[in-house]
Amino acid sequence: MTTYIYQRKDWPHFRWRNEIVAAPLAEARHHQGRLLGRMEELNPNLRREASLETLTAEAVKSSEIEGERLDETQVRSSVARRLKIDLGQAVRVERHVQGMVDLILDATMNYDRALTKERLFTWHRSLFGVERAGIDAIVIGAWRKDRQGPMRVLSGLIGHEKLHYEAPPAHRVETEMRAFLRWFNREDQELDPVLKAGIAHLWFVTIHPFEDGNGRIGRAIADMLLTRSERSAQRFYSMSAQIRRERKQYYDYLEETQKGDLDITAHLRWFIGCFDRALANADALFSGTLKKARFWEQHAPVTLNERQRTMLTRLLDGFEGKLTSSKWAAITKCSQDTATRDIQALIDKDILQKDQSGGRSTSYSLVK
């Protein structure tokens, strides 16, 4: 019969071999500092755009790990509204999408607030709204009740299921969560916040306090501690996007650790590695933002009027269709002659070029 870590006498006194995790942790923290330093060099608007892309990925990918696909356009619109970024077009956001965004933003923007039972219940209600009725009903905004038997994680066909994990019985959840929250909110100068994030995530999903949503809330808890490690609510890398890439290893390490003893060295090594790989993949996450930053740095000495800046920004953001002088005039509300002069000036400065394709109207694009 399988013994889970919460059934061991020394639970929840996790231990790990510091000589194994110290070097990869130091390297990851170094990479974290370098990324944050690079982002500090961007102007505030570009940093906000990078944070928008990161938070959008975090919400979308954290849900995707659990098999739920959120509309990315709705997620980005919801995050942009909260960050006060004008995307130029209002998008209707469904309640479940807004709820996921609310969870992610509260965890990261209010990272310095205490984590309490009431706050966790609010997060749970954000994910699921009012209590559902019927066969799939779950208790919302409260600890699980195990009304249909033990909380089990299974896979496979009915009658041939594989048991991956069985959570602590419901009557233990209140006590277990009280101990977890006391530890989480305790100031600990000796424990690195990245290590604490890895421990907190494992501890929370081991307790599995809710009937659903434990993975998404557990990852938000880890993000909250990673945000504390930087003392900034702006996000420039997504742990959930990286976990999504490594989903099999993620679940394998969780299962192996919960069936092992209280030595969680292997799990922490994986978590630190995943964190480091998330940092390394940050460039890809907001490559468009970095492309804009390099463009404006390259052309900083060039004198541009407001119309030219507006249209160059449109092109960098992904202009829909082909840019013509007529479109330039319509968007910037100027005459056709002024639009032509604006465009020619940018061609002379080697910023715009005429497209080779024919057609009734000449079109223009950025010089690569």
Image (tube, rainbow, N blue to C red):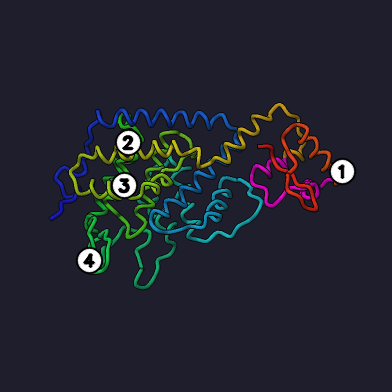
The secondary element bearing badge 4 is classed as loop
Give the residue number, with chain letter if any, for mark 4: 160
As shown in the figure, which amino acid type bears the numbered disc 2? Leu
Q: Which mark is residue 249?
A: 3
Q: Is residue 64 visible?
A: yes
Badge 4 density bin: few <14, some 14–19, many ≥20, Cα 10 Å: few
Give the residue number, with chain letter if any, for mark 2: 195
Marked residue nearer the N-terminal end (2 or 4): 4
Spatial distance from mark 3 to mark 4, Cα to Cα? 23 Å
User: Residue 288: which quarter of the image?
Assistant: top right
Numbered disc total: 4
As shown in the figure, which amino acid type bears the numbered disc 4? His
Marked residue nearer the N-terminal end (1 or 3): 3
Residues rendered magenta in the picture: 310-335
User: Residue 238: which quarter of the image?
Assistant: top left
Q: Which mark is residue 69?
A: none
Give the residue number, with chain letter if any, for mark 1: 337
